[in-house]
């Protein structure tokens, strides 16, 4: 097994209810400071699918899994998730360890 060398990455796939994409983007952006204020957060981004309507991806990098899990259950993050809930129709969460990055 390869040795851990990169960040711990989280990929959230979000299916947004039809007609609610602009509001979802606005509310997501309003909560971004809560994420980037975390010392263990190395950055995050919101992307819209080029192939599927109303599908978004949230990618965030963390120093390690434990730091992400601690943030995920924090009161501030729970409040932000609750604000996004009315726009969401479904989704999935993937967590991974980045082994190598090539530029």
Image: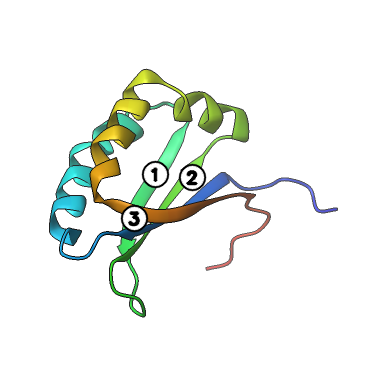
Q: Which mark is residue 86?
A: none
Which of the two discs, 3 and 1, labels the residue nearer the N terminus? 1
Q: Which mark is residue 43?
A: 1
Q: Label 3 near label 2: C-beta < 8 Å?
A: no
SS for dot 2: strand
Whether residue 45 sits left or right of residue 9 in the image: it is: left
Q: Residue 47: image x %, image y %?
A: 32, 62
Q: Residue 59: image x %, image y %?
A: 43, 52
SS for dot 3: strand
Q: Tell me what residue is drawn at x 57 percent, y 44 percent.
A: 7
Foreground tag (3 vs 1)? 3
Disc 1: CA contacts within 10 A as few (<14), some (14-19) or many (>=20): some
Residue that numbered label 3 is attached to: 89
Q: Is residue 59 above or below residue 63?
A: below
SS for dot 1: strand
Q: Tell me what residue is drawn at x 61 percent, y 35 percent.
A: 65
The answer to whether residue 27 is visible is: yes
Which of the two discs, 2 and 3, labels the residue nearer the N terminus? 2
User: Residue 8 sits in which quadrant?
Assistant: top right
Q: Tell me what residue is drawn at x 47 percent, y 24 percent.
A: 73
**Spatial separation of the CA atoms under disc 3 and disc 1:** 25 Å
**Spatial separation of the CA atoms under disc 2 and disc 3:** 24 Å
Q: Which mark is residue 61?
A: 2
Q: Quick one: 20 or 49, which is closer to the camera?
A: 20
Q: Residue 19: image x %, image y %?
A: 15, 64
User: Residue 89 sits in which quadrant?
Assistant: bottom left
**Spatial separation of the CA atoms under disc 1 and disc 2:** 6 Å
Q: Residue 37: image x %, image y %?
A: 32, 28
Residue furthest bottom as drawn: 51
């Amino acid at each position: 097994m390869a040795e851990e060398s990169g960040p711990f990455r989280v990929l959230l796939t979000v299916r947004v209810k039809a007609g609610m994409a602009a509001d979802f983007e606005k509310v997501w952006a309003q909560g971004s400071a809560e994420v980037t204020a975390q010392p263990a957060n190395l950055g995050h981004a919101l992307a819209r699918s080029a192939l599927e309507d109303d599908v978004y991806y949230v990618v965030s990098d963390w120093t390690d899994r434990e730091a992400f899990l601690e943030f995920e259950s924090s009161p501030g993050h729970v409040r932000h998730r609750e604000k996004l809930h009315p726009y969401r129709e479904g989704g999935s969460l993937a967590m991974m360890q980045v082994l190598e990055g090539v530029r």
